[in-house]
Amino acid sequence: MPAQGFGKIEVEVLRRDEISVELVVRGIPLPVLNAVRRIMQLEVPTAAVEDVIFYENNTPIYDEIIAHRLAMLPILSEDALRKLRSPDECYRCFQEPSGMTPEEMSKECGGCFTIMRFQGEAGSEPIVVRAGDLKTDDPDIRPSYPEIPITVIGPGQRIAFDARIRLGRGIEHIKWSPVTVAGTRYVANITTKRVSEDMFSEVEKCVEVCPVKILSFNKEEGRIEVSDIYKCTLCMQCVKKCPPESIDVKPRSDEYILFYESAGQLSVKTIALQAIDILISKIDHLIDQVKSLKGG
Ligand code: SF4
């Protein structure tokens, strides 16, 4: 693939729903797009449960299992990014042991976390505790999906706990990653040529091999037609099965597809903006480092 620089940068939405997006990105080299993708997975901060203090749990489900389920809950993080202090500032507050006195702890760790509380017991019937039953001190920082079941409390059983929620990054633990998946793929450059009449029946048949059904044979034009280039997976089946003069498929080097799905903490737009901000701050840091080098 030829080396390329930055051309005119364009972003177009190919497909979008509430939690996922596919973008066509032009004018950005693949390694840079890949850096954005990896920052999305590992470095964009979100809020998640870090530790849980159980005051009571006489159900047969161990504290550790409930704590793990709480930790994996996606927590709405748009406001948490603004309200909670960054993981770097709060690093010491979550170390075991922190090495801080209670006085230092209350001085240094304010704004590092918010609490999510639960207290409940079942009467004569078992009850299912769901994410929506948990109450956070800050209502803007709460579970993204209230229907997620946490545990079951049987008749006569009780549970009470406080869970501390803080900002973190996917590189620390996957529970803080804002995406379930983030990937890039190539866009195909498909060229077709007119074929001689004696090849018509062969070409008509070979286009059926396309798994995403974007190829058809136009008898009047005597050539293969492509309906949606962005659906092409570059599987190369058409190139293998069709006469070499009829079709050629190559990856483009100036256009790529970036797709990702939010795990529910942040909107797809915030995830992209945060990732780009982090990339820019890394480059700024690199510039500062180079500038501080001694000598010319
Ligand atoms: S490379 Fe694969 S997906 Fe693309 S047009 Fe050919 S058969 Fe279809």
Image (cartoon, helix red, strand yellow):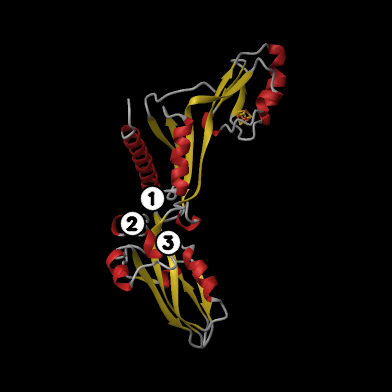
Front-lying residue, 117 or 94: 94
Relative to 3, 275 lies left or right: left
Residue behind label 1 places its C-beta within 8 angstroms of ligand 1: no
Is residue 228 in sight in this rendering?
no
**Residue wearing tag 2:** 89
Q: Secondary structure at mark 1?
A: loop
What distance separates the C-alpha of mark 1 from that of mark 2?
Answer: 24 Å
Whichever of callouts 1 and 2 sits on the residue coming sooner in the sequence is: 2
Query: How far from the left and from the top, in percent, is residue 10?
Result: 38, 30
- Residue depth check, mark 1 versus mark 3: number of the one nearer the observer: 3
What distance separates the C-alpha of mark 1 from that of mark 3?
Answer: 16 Å
Q: Are marks 1 and 3 in contact (CB under 8 Å)?
A: no
Residue behind label 3 places its C-beta within 8 angstroms of ligand 1: no
Other-residue count near label 1 (Cα within 10 Å), few / some / many at <14 / 14–19 / ≥20: some
**Residue wearing tag 3:** 48
What distance separates the C-alpha of mark 3 from that of mark 2?
Answer: 16 Å
Query: How far from the left and from the top, in percent, is residue 123?
Result: 48, 87
Identity of the residue drawn at 35% across and 68% down:
100
- Residue depth check, mark 1 versus mark 2: number of the one nearer the observer: 2
Whichever of callouts 1 and 3 sits on the residue coming sooner in the sequence is: 3
Query: Whereabouts is ligand 1, in terms of quadrant?
Result: top right
**Marker count (numbered):** 3
